Amino acid sequence: MPGWLCHGVSVDQGGAPPVFSASAEIDGDHLHVVVAGEVDMATADTMLQTALREPAGQITLDLSAVTFFDSAAIHALVRLAQEFPGRLTVRPSRQVRRVLEISGLGEQSWLDPA
């Protein structure tokens, strides 16, 4: 499809199914990043770098398939919010939403309320 660019990363741990993946597609100036699995100190930077790889005016970070989200992931998310003020939308999984609520970030304007 013209205008679309896709990057993907997955971390495979010893033959087991990947526990983390991050992919990005860009359409015009809107970057859509889809993250799945566990986002922790080993994978949070990959999530961040996937989101920062392409210049974009708007970014949607789809975390609806994320099963684990730790403090390193929170830090990466806050960095993205600082990089894209007013231009970031985060679609959290139930687990991610709970972590963000506990950490005091549950009412951020970039957090999709759905």
Image (cartoon, rainbow, N blue to C red):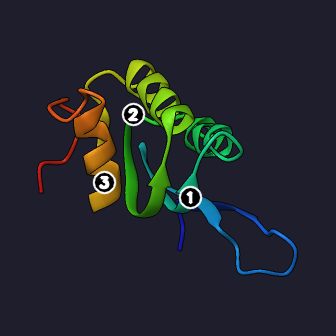
The span from disc 3 to disc 1 (Cα, nearest Å) is: 13 Å
Q: Residues within 10 Å of mark 3 (few under 14, many from 20)?
A: many
- Name the residue beneath numbered marker 2: 57
Residue drawn at point x = 38 percent, y = 26 percent:
81
Residue drawn at point x = 35 percent, y = 51 percent:
96
The span from disc 1 to disc 2 (Cα, nearest Å) is: 27 Å
Residue type at the position of mark 1 = Glu
On the image, the x and y values in percent for residue 84 come to: 39, 25
* First-in-chain label (1 vs 2): 1
Relative to 64, does residue 80 appear above or below in the rendering? above
Residue type at the position of mark 3 = Pro
Relative to 8, does residue 83 appear above or below in the rendering? above
Q: Residues within 10 Å of mark 2 (few under 14, many from 20)?
A: few
Viewer can see residue 93: no
Q: Residues within 10 Å of mark 1 (few under 14, many from 20)?
A: many
* First-in-chain label (3 vs 1): 1
Comparing 36 with 16, the one in front is 16
- Name the residue beneath numbered marker 1: 38
Q: Toward which corner of the image does residue 42 lie, by quadrant?
A: top right
- Name the residue beneath numbered marker 3: 92
Comparing 52 with 20, the one in front is 20
Q: Secondary structure at mark 2?
A: loop
Q: Toward which corner of the image does residue 49 lie, by quadrant?
A: top right
Q: Toward which corner of the image does residue 6 lie, by quadrant?
A: bottom right
Disc number placed over residue 64 in the picture, else none: none
Residue type at the position of mark 2 = Gly
